[in-house]
Image (cartoon, helix red, strand yellow):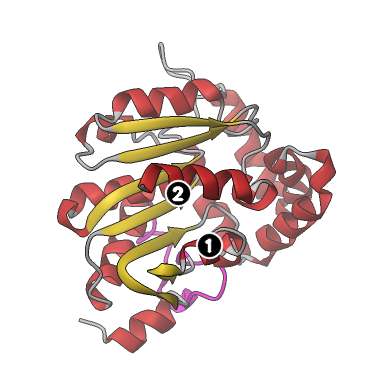
Amino acid sequence: MESRMSIISKYNIHLSGSGDQVMLFSHGYGCDQNMWRFVAPSFSDGCKIVLYDLMGAGRSDTSHYTPEKYNSLHQYADDVLEICTALDLKDVIFVGHSVSCTIGILAQLKKPDAFSHLILIGPTPCYINKDDYKGGFNESDITNMIEALESNFFHWASFITPVIIGNDEKKEFSDELRISFCSMPDGIAKNFAKVTFLGDYREYLNQVTGPALILQTNPDAIVNVEVGKYVAKQIKNAHYVELPTAGHCPHLTAPDLVISAMKSYLK
């Protein structure tokens, strides 16, 4: 077993705040822990805040990354549990954005007692339309997207990041997200994209035992409202909140709405 300090270095973990309650924040694809800078500090009075970078992102130690090891979101969930074990974290409030919502769900299923709540911002278990499930994209859409990012990742990142932000008045965040996307090692970014956009984790939703808050924006070009409602319906003890703002990153573009919804729910 790796030491506490090696785990902290491995995932670039930063600890702050005080109190017995732990909140662990997990960012989305192409991002890093800095994306939580407008939200996490609002909970540091009374909570221990844990920020980390997904393996391959930010300042994580990419020497631990191989495409074979990280060929599904299950390994990312195991990373969360490794952090919880190394730091002796219990009754964790897991706050995930986008792909990290599924990572949190998988982690909770593997070790339910480690988590008290899941807060899921823009969750989707599957991006592809399948039978009656409307994930928002046809399989050909996702295939074409994967081909585009493999052909010219930097061009694809420049195109997709304004779509993700979804708010023309917040152009600075589109630029920030594009820079963040392009800072990932090319091979890792492409492999993680396949894992993120081609996966189907719907079967796990109705196994979730802990309470969950689903925060959904409207409109969101990446995860539509129907998906958010589907996730909330499948998770037995879920509370659905639709935020009156657009875009897939409300923790950047409308942090006050996210903070207010989280605090109201946790009361």
Residue 126 in the image, given as x and y percentages of width and height: 44, 32
Where residue 122 sits in the image (x, y, percent)?
51, 38
Identify which residue, 204 or 233, lies in the foreground.
233
Q: How many neighbours does mark 1 have within 10 angstroms: few (below 14), some (14-19), or many (20 or more)?
A: some
Q: Tag count in the figure?
A: 2
| Above or below 135: residue 27 | below
Task: Determine contact: label 1, label 2, CB under 8 Å.
Answer: yes
Instruction: Name the amino acid type tagged 1.
Output: Ser
The answer to whether residue 132 is seen in the rendering is yes
Q: Tell me the residue at 44%/51% (across/down).
A: 96
Q: Which mark is residue 42?
A: 1
Distance Cα–Cα, label 1 vs label 2: 9 Å
Dot 1 falls on a residue whose secondary structure is helix
Queried whether the magenta region covers residue 24, the answer comes back as no
Task: Specify the quadrant of the image occupied by residue 3.
Answer: bottom left
Q: Name the spot of residue 2 as percent of width and height, x first.
A: 26, 83
Q: Quadrant of the N terminus?
A: bottom left
**Which of disc 2 and disc 1 is earlier in sequence?**
1
Residue beneath the point at 60% across and 60% down = 35
Q: Residue at x 25, y 77 (%)?
A: 86
Neighbourhood count class around disc 2 (C-alpha, 10 Å): few under 14, some 14–19, many 20 upward: few
Looking at the rendered structure, the kind of residue marked 2 is Lys
Q: Where residue 192 sits in the image (x, y, percent)?
A: 50, 53
Name the one closer to the observer, 133 or 72: 133
Tell me the chief SS of the magenta region.
loop
At a point 41% along the width and 11% down the height, the residue shown is: 132
In the picture shown, does residue 248 fall above or below 126?
below
Tell me where the magenta segment starts and ends, as one range: 54-71
Q: Secondary structure at mark 2?
A: helix
Against 156, residue 141 (above or below) is above
Residue at numbered disc 2: 263
Is residue 56 on the magenta stretch?
yes
